[in-house]
Structure formats: structure tokens, C-alpha cells
Amino acid sequence: MTASTATPATLDTVLSHIDSDIDAATARLIELLRIPSISTDPAYKDDCARAADWLVADLETLGISARAIPTPGHPMVMGKYEGPEGTPHLVFYGHYDVQPVDPLDLWDNDPFDPKLEETAKGTVIRGRGTSDDKGQLMTFVEACRAWKEVHGTLPCTITFFFEGEEESGSPSLIPFMEEYKEALKGDVALICDTGLFGHDTPAIVTMLRGLMGEEVTITAADRDLHSGMYGGVARNPIHVLTKLIAELHDDEGRVTLPGFYDGVNELPAEVAAQWEALGFDHKSFLGEVDLSQPAGEKDRTPLEMIWSRPTLEVNGITGGYTGDGFKTVLPSKASAKISCRLVGNQDPEAIRAALRAHIEAGLPEDCTVSYNPHGSGPASTMATDHPAFEAARVALSDEWPNEAAFVGCGGSIPIAGYFKQIVGVDALLTGFGRDDDGLHSPNEKYDLECFHKGIRSWARILDKVTAAT
Ligand code: BES
Ligand code: ZN
């Protein structure tokens, strides 16, 4: 499908409109940010629905017919704009749910009362979801708004698809996408939930890690015991659990589970060379969070560790007495939340089975184990030969001071692979977050510059991708 690209003058008019509307766009974003749509906590169910309704109403102000579609979890927002005859169909995805805010006392302001704040590095919008992902989602909506206000129409057909469960592992996504497969069948899917490379280099993600999560609970005695009366003779489940966890890595930083590396491929030489040329400065990346030493597999570069190698991490561990003061207790239970980032063709369920087998092989006879499996999904690789990739690369390079880079992403976005597997559409991921945004952390922020240039980037991408697709 071909359509003529906007003339430079028409694109420039949209970009100028974006510039003059940035304060109003920021105010709209702040309205959305004020809704505490924490998907993982049932207490915020109504707020998730409110955020979905807010987005429906906002899309309707652009002349887009939209609705919030119920799921067993939180609603999906779908909207469609029919573009001029013969133009491509783009499907845009972002998520309106956010992570929990605890520990709340580490926030300098109310996470759901976002404010513009002047910092040494520039103006930031601070609050939960600013960067992950409401601010990013709104960069696309605002680009469409500017285009519509300038031209009275959008450049092509666009389906808007906003999820409210991404931070909970997207439990409703597969059945939903199966049901709405036809509506989601565009020429390319655009996903805005990732970041820049370094400070100023726009990035298009070519590979994304998958995820497997498992909560393991070990029970020893049927109640907590006095450690003076039982200590020495009774089994301590924290000791059992931590020993089993310690065995999961060897001294070289490799994961010891049998079969863990099945399906992990070596990086093609040209990709390794391209990554090398990015000049990733791991000292400053780690220095930013007060660390200095790469802690993964000893024979891998830091970029490989983040983008193309799998990991096994303990995300949380509980057991025994953790309150103030001291209590001489032998706990009955200990549990750990363990997750693996997956790459290549690693099979999440095979890895879950290997982890369970390891625990069960080392479990003392008088202990029991129970599991709470969390969502899982394999890694995905993007089709960089799709014409939208080159179009987006040029568009992003026009907006930012540096040429756009093709990068990996260590995080996971379940939908990225589902677009191809379920709907048969290639996905293109780009986004404008910075490493210091504090995703999932206290004091999350989104640089105003990223919001503004992100909107401008999407206007340029809409222009170029419409012409190329
Ligand atoms: N926006 C992130 C993905 C991401 C992480 C992009 C790091 C760039 C850098 C996304 O919202 C996210 O947090 N995904 C979760 C998925 C999980 C809960 C299934 C993740 O990666 O942990
Ligand atoms: Zn996230």
C-alpha cells in the first residue's frame, strides 16, 4: 500500500502545533496520571476502569470511536479511526496501568498528585506512571491530536489499543487478542513502552526478553517455634530456601538449572559489532545507581547481560520475624519470588519445571513446598526488514540529535510477541524513557523534553510510515 507523504510544510505545521500545545498536552497527561490505576492490587479495580474511561473520552475528543471492553481483569480500550482511502492501517499499543507505589515513604511527593518539577537536568513530570507508561502512551495520542487539529483528519487508519494489565503479566491479553484478531490486523503494530539509548539517542527495539515468574513457599514445622526450645533440632525453612537459591548460580555467574541455556543463541557477529559500536558506558549506567561492577556471567559484555542473555533473579524473599526489635523464632514458612528473563527460544514452562525439580530434589523429607506460578512468556525478536523500521529510523533520526539505534531491551512487554503469534502482525517498539526515570521505583519521572520530543517523534513516524507501508 502506498500513500503520499505529507509535504515538509504539512509536517512542519503539525510540529509547530505540537510545540504551541505542549502545556495543554501536559495538563491532559497530568489528569490521567492522577488516576491510581494500579492493576496488581484489587483495591484499585475501579480506578483502572476510570483510567480506561478517561482514555475513551479523550479519544472521542479526537473524533475516534472508542470503547472500554470488559475482560475478566481490567478493561481494554479500543478505538478506531478510518483514514483516507488507500492509506495503511497502524495499530498503536500502550498500557494505562501502573505499578504499586510502595514504599510510599521514599516518595518526595504524592505519586498520584503529579507535578512539574525543575531539576538540575531539566523539567520533569514526577509521579507514578509518568514514564511507564501513561506519559509514553499519551505521546502517540497527542501526536494524533495535533495532526487532526491541523489537517482535520489523521494520515492513515489507526486502531488504538490500550491495556490495563501489562504490569500484572497481561492475564487477559491472549483470549482478548484471539477474539479481536480481525480488528487488530493492521499493517504494523506500534508499541510505545521502551526508552532512549543513553540520553539522546532514539532507539528501536529489535529483541525483547521474555519472563517466567514463580513464587516458592517452603513449610517446615506446622507453626512458628521458640528458637531456644527447638533451635538445632527443628528445620528452619529460611535456611532450606536460601541454600536452594544459592545453588542456582555458579561462581561464573551462570545459572545451574539443567537445560536452562537450551534455546539461548550466540549473538550474530553483525549484531555484536553493531552493539559494540553503540559504545555503551556501563560504568556510568551502573554509577547512576551507585554500583560499579557488572554482576552477571563473567564472560559476557554488560550489554549482552541486559539484552541477550537470560537471568534468574530473586525479586523478594520473606519469612520469620521482620518487624522492629528481635524475636527468637524459628519460622514455619519461608518464600521467595523468583523470576527469569528469557531470550532466544528458551521455553518458559520447561524452565519452571527445572526450577521446581531443583527445589524438590533438595527438599528435606519433613518439609513441603507449594508454588504460585506467575505469568510467563517467551522472548521475541522483531522483523527489522519490515519497511516501517527504516521509515521510523529516519523519522526518529530527524527529531533527535543522534541517529536512531537498533537496540535490545532487557524488560518484557508480553504483547510484543503476541502481535506476531496471534494476529500475524509485526510490531515496532520505540519509546522515549530515560534510564534514570525510576520505572517501578519511588519518584518515577518523565522528562518534559522526552514527552515533547516523543510527541514530535510520533508525528514524524506517522508521516514516514504512512508513506512507506
Ligand atoms: N515498560 C516496561 C518494559 C521495559 C522495562 C522497557 C525496562 C524498558 C526497560 C513494562 O511496563 C514492564 O515493566 N514490563 C514488565 C512485564 C511483567 C510485569 C510481565 C517487566 O518487564 O517486568
Ligand atoms: Zn512497567
Image (cartoon, helix red, strand yellow):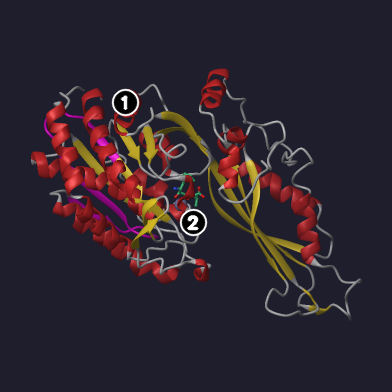
Q: Image quadrant for the N terminus?
A: top left
Instruction: Judge whether 271 appears above or below 36 on screen.
Output: above
Work out whether 349 lies above or below 301: below
Q: Is residue 78 magenta?
A: yes
User: How far across and how far down the image is residue 139, in percent?
Assistant: 29, 46
Callout 1 secondary element: helix
Residue type of the residue flagged with mark 1: Val
Can you identify the residue that label 2 sits on? 440
Relative to residue 269, is residue 310 depicted above or below?
below
Secondary structure of the residue carrying numbered label 2: loop
CB of residue at label 2: within 8 Å of ligand 2? Answer: yes
Count of numbered badges drawn on the protein: 2
Dot 2 and dot 1 residues touching (CB under 8 Å):
no
Whether the magenta-drawn stretch holds residue 150 is answered as no
The numbered mark at residue 394 is 1
Q: Nearer the viewer, residue 336 or 277?
A: 277
x, y percentage for residue 439? Answer: 47, 53
Residue 186 found in image quarter: top left
Please provide percent x and percent y for residue 379.
Answer: 52, 37
Residue 347 makes an appearance in the image? no
